[in-house]
Amino acid sequence: MNRMPLRTLACCVLVGLVTAGCAQAEAPAAQTDAPAAQSAPAPNMAGASLPDFTGIVQRNAPAVVHVEAKYNGRRREPRMQAGMPDDPQLEFFRRFFGMPMMPSPEEQEHTSLGSGFVISSDGYILTNNHVVEGADAVTVRLQDRRTLTAKVVGTDPNYDIALLKVDAKGLPSVTIGDSRALKPGQWVLAIGSPFGLDYTVTQGIVSAVGRNLGSGDQPYTSFIQTDVPINRGNSGGPLFNLQGQVVGINSQIYSNTGGYLGVAFSIPIDVAMNAVKQIKDHGYVTRGQLGVQVRGVDSDIAKALKLDNAQGAIVADVTDGSGAARAGIQPGDVILGYNGQPIRDAADLPPLVGMTKPGTRVPVEILRDGKKQTLQVTIGEMPHGKAGATGGDHPAASSGSAALGLSVRDLDEDARQQLDLPKGEGVVIADITGPVAARAGLQPGDVILRVNQQKVGSAAAFRAATRDVKPGDTILLLVRRDDVTNFVTLTVPSDK
């Protein structure tokens, strides 16, 4: 497959890329869901032989389905994926589909395939949202060769979950396991339809748990990373443990070819079933909201704050009226723990908060001025959208810092009102004048709120705060761009 720079494959089928074909269904007829509920005993790993997966496959394959999504019109172009590695040799393929042997152009433009599995005998089926997103019609094919029309009951793009329903009774179903009990090194296996080859079984081990893949469009999911061979068409299929229980939904791969390169990611089944319950109850998925913008504590921030180690999530902004604001969390606080769970990086926080039921009161451990304290925060509900404000571009007095490579000017009242900033806080970058600010990604129009935790509300205040900067120093800036506030470190090169 040709490389698509920093893109995900949309759930459409693109000409010349990937599409769906007929899967072969030669396994026995569907069974009742009673056998599927049986658990296979864990093989004895004390010996030299590998575990035998045949019992797991025989009991659970009838509950795995082939999902086909059809579109009346041409699919939209793939969306860009934020937070992806900027590496010419590595592309993040979030979505993968089956591939037929000889697809026609019409099929390529109007069909996509994936996998799924029956979670209850009355016809509820789980798959990925990206497999069926925007489809005009969805069908599922069972192992006994029956093809059934599926209704999309509900979806959640952030968790990449879709709940389907077919009009059938007595279907074989899987047994749901506990993904929280998974540990690196445990055996797991997948059943799905890679390249349209139905009921393909692959196995491997859990490589890591709680894997966060950056900001992207799934910041609320901590994935299960495995070395199970996963390819296009496995999307939405189940990941089993040795007890024959589903512990994940196969969803993503890292690849520079579009095929499996040894790294695959699955959505934890606990996350998926939480979404299923909410979709069934009220048609959509709610998430908790803490009310902060955070970034990870890297070595530069740790140096600037004189921290012993670079871990935690430093608060860049606190939303007015949020649970965090009411609890007293402030910009510059370093979040070390949430509801008893350690926070080692900023990416650890959103999945934990998102899974918290709105209205729940949770302890949040912070570090402020070198001292640890625990605040009780009542979690709010994540809104479906939010708006931001940007500063205007009005002439004003400017001041420069040759060492930092930027010049700033005062904010006028219109810009300050748009940004909802009080007097005495904020200066706007007028120009990037040197490599230090340029390497940090700063741009004209960015608003600097603080310098080393000190508020700056004028060009003169900024000049005073940066007057003593010298080669080798690291400066911590709190910067707002549009509606996002973040910490940025600037390290002045040493003369040596």
Image: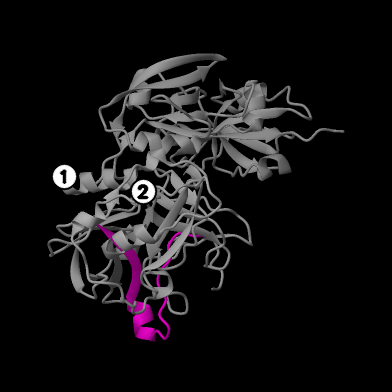
Identify the disc placed on residue 61.
Answer: none
Residue 281 disc label: 1
Residue at horizontal 54 percent and vertical 56 percent from the top: 263
Instruction: Give the structural element (helix, strand or loop) at label 2.
Output: loop
What type is the residue that disc 1 sits on? Asp
Q: Residue at x 45, y 57 (%)?
A: 252
Write the residue at 43% across / 79% down: 15
Which sits in the foreground, 425 or 307?
307
Highlighted magenta segment, given as a residue range: 92-118
Q: Quadrant of the C terminus?
A: top right
Could you say where residue 356 lies in the image, as x and y percent from the top left? 31, 33
Q: Secondary structure at mark 1?
A: helix
Seen in the image, is 393 located left or right of residue 237?
right
Q: Residues within 10 Å of mark 2 (few under 14, many from 20)?
A: few
* The quadrant where residue 488 appears: top right
The nearer-to-camera label among 1 and 2 is: 2
Q: Is residue 426 magenta?
A: no
